[in-house]
Amino acid sequence: MQVRLKDIAKLTGYSITTISRALAGYADVNAETRAFILQTAHQLGYQPNGIAQQLRQQIANAIGLIIPSDAHDLNGDFFSQLLHGISAEAAEQHFDILICSALPGEEEMRAYRRLVGGNRVDGVILARTRRDDPRIAYLRAKKHPFVVSGRAAPNEPSDFPYIDVDSQAAIRMLVAHLHSLGHRQIGLILPPPDVAYTGYRLMGYQEGLAAAGLPFCADYLQYGDLARSGGFHAAQHLLSTQPQLTALIACNDLMALGAISAALGRGLRVGADLSIVGFDDLPAAEYSHPPLTTVRQPIYGIGRRLAAMLIGLIRGDQSAHTQIILQGELIVRASSGAPQTR
């Protein structure tokens, strides 16, 4: 015999409306009442009719994530770590994840219109913000729930729920670390100019140099594509045109690993002849040759918190409108050391 909402209401003494909202996880049902109703439903063996529930409430019980199809090394980069965290939290809260892959630009916007305009997802997690990001403008115009991994670019409003790591402070920390080892000629490999956090990382580099009493030299900068190949080619250029450099900061670990390959190919000892540091602390960083000094950001934990924040928004929890900035942690390994004459 199928257990119905009125059976739970009869046993608990609560109305069918309260029972329904408690089972759906709405925030206006207090925790003690919800726990009692959930326990009673479990004891009775209640199984919700998911399809009927979705039709009544016009919800999909799904969240969307669109990954750029030009993202590199999906088995070991930022997106894979983020997705693991999102998936874990969504599963615990009984939400599905709809993942799409699209090239940035019009193809990506079509993917958003399919997900949002077709009511295929209740909310969207947006990652790797860009300058004047059209995705944010679209989601805001549609009044569709969304949360963001990362703030808007400097001088643009970050008037949306987000979680970000203070990469400006993190790059300052890397400059200070290298300066403390004795480095005075420090190069920087930046993400593409249209990525929102590029501006923060450049400012952190400039501030770190100023705090150390070192001059800023635009010739010490190169842009990469966030892939190993981008770090390799950027390092090749810097080492060819600025041979006096004794250290390189790469703004993500994949580019740092590419820079290490470029240095080793030139016969340089990384950590002695040339120090190289990164940002993210991907699993590969600890096992590179040599192990990579980097800034750790809790990517998996950020994914979980983003999913929890978005599900809270979907359920009407106003406290889910949150803006969180986390601090990175310096992880010192063998790829950074005191400069030696070469």
Image (cartoon, rainbow, N blue to C red):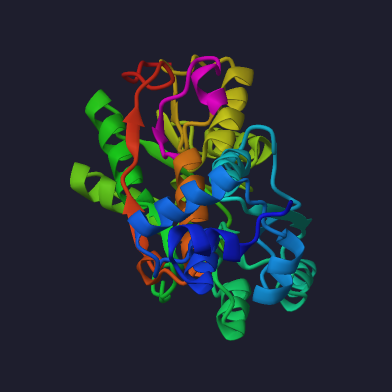
From the top left corner, tell me how far across and down residue 334 is, in percent: 41, 16
Image: 294 above or below 198: above
Image: 222 above or below 271: below
Q: Residue at x 76, y 56 (%)?
A: 100
Is residue 196 visible from the viewing direction of this image? no
Q: Residue at x 51, y 63 (%)?
A: 10
Q: Residue at x 39, y 19 (%)?
A: 333
Total numbered labels: 0
Q: Is residue 78 left or right of residue 326?
A: right
Image: 337 above or below 68: above
Q: Residue at x 22, y 28 (%)?
A: 180
Residue closer to the observer: 78 or 294: 78
**294 magenta-colored:** yes
Q: Residue furthest bottom?
A: 141
Asked where in the image residue 289 lies, by quadrant, the reply is top right
Residue closer to the observer: 92 or 228: 92
From the top left corner, tell me how far across and down residue 340 is, in percent: 36, 16
From the top left corner, tell me how far across and down residue 96 is, in percent: 68, 52
From the top left corner, tell me how far across and down residue 24 is, in percent: 55, 62
**226 magenta-colored:** no
Is residue 76 visible from the viewing direction of this image? yes
Image: 235 above or below 36: above
Q: Is residue 287 left or right of residue 4?
A: left
Asked where in the image residue 342 lies, by quadrant, the reply is top left
The magenta region covers 283-298
Residue closer to the observer: 55 or 165: 55
